[in-house]
Amino acid sequence: MHSNFVNQPVHQSPAHLNFERPSLDEFHWTPIQPNKVNQIQHPSKPTTQPLHHINPMHHPANHVPQQPMQQPVKSPQQNTIPSNQYEYPPVDPNLLYKSANETKKLMSDASKVLDKLSSSKDFGSKVMYFAERSDIEEVKRLIKTTGIKRDVKIDYNPDGLRLEFDSTTENVPCCKLFVTLRWR
């Protein structure tokens, strides 16, 4: 199938394909009446209707372009609540409420770490020193000395420290709080 194109240069199209632009004579401009989509006025009749372009390369000779569908206009007495195509379960804010309260506790723990790091350069130096030597257990021990109540996942690289506080409520992971601090 592709053997006909083997020796042809890449920039040329195959001889049987015509990529030339059609001339303007090939385009037909036909007025379309609104609300009478299936009827086309004869081009010889004068009209004040807007003209719509029909490209013969894309439309059969007797095809009439369709106008966009319009949504029905609602009367003021009709329900103004937008209808959805999906039915959603009833709203139950209990888990959101519990997640927000758990996140406040995570923020309290994060604040304790940040307070210590922002008030003690000695503490910060120790955290950096052990992190740079990949002594994760000592970094965790130092972070725990700030008074946090939950475990924290600690990640670090040569440029800084990343702390991940997370919690569950009703045995569901509900919330995470990330703190990223740069030291280089």
Image: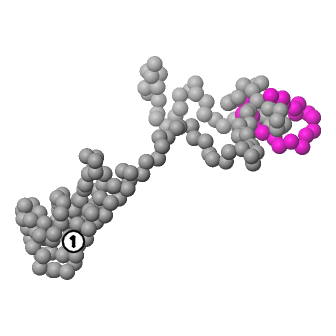
The quarter of the picture where residue 161 lies is bottom left
Is residue 155 visible from the viewing direction of this image? no
- When the figure is inspected, residue 101 is found, relative to residue 24, above or below; the finding is below
Is residue 102 visible from the viewing direction of this image? yes
- When the figure is inspected, residue 179 is found, relative to residue 29, above or below; the finding is below
95 relative to 73 in the view: left or right? left
In percent of width and height, residue 159 lies at 20, 67
Are there few (<14), some (14-19), or many (20+) residues within 10 Å of tag 1?
some
Residue 87 covered by magenta stretch: no
Residue 49 covered by magenta stretch: yes
Q: Name the residue at 72% across, 25% down.
A: 60
Closer to the camera, 31 or 132?
132
86 relative to 133 in the view: left or right? right
In percent of width and height, residue 132 lies at 10, 66
In percent of width and height, residue 34 lies at 82, 38
134 relative to 1 in the view: left or right? left
Q: Name the residue at 26% across, 62% down.
A: 106
In percent of width and height, residue 57 lies at 68, 30
Asked which colour scheme the image uses, the reply is one colour
Q: Name the residue at 91% across, 40% down.
A: 47
**Which amino acid type is marked by label 1?**
Lys
Name the residue carrying label 1: 112
> Principal SS element in the magenta part?
loop
| Magenta stretch bounds | 38-56
117 relative to 169 in the view: left or right? left
Q: Name the residue at 47% across, 22% down.
A: 4
- Quadrant containing the C terminus is bottom left
Closer to the camera, 112 or 71?
112
The quarter of the picture where residue 155 lies is bottom left
- SS category of the residue bearing label 1: helix
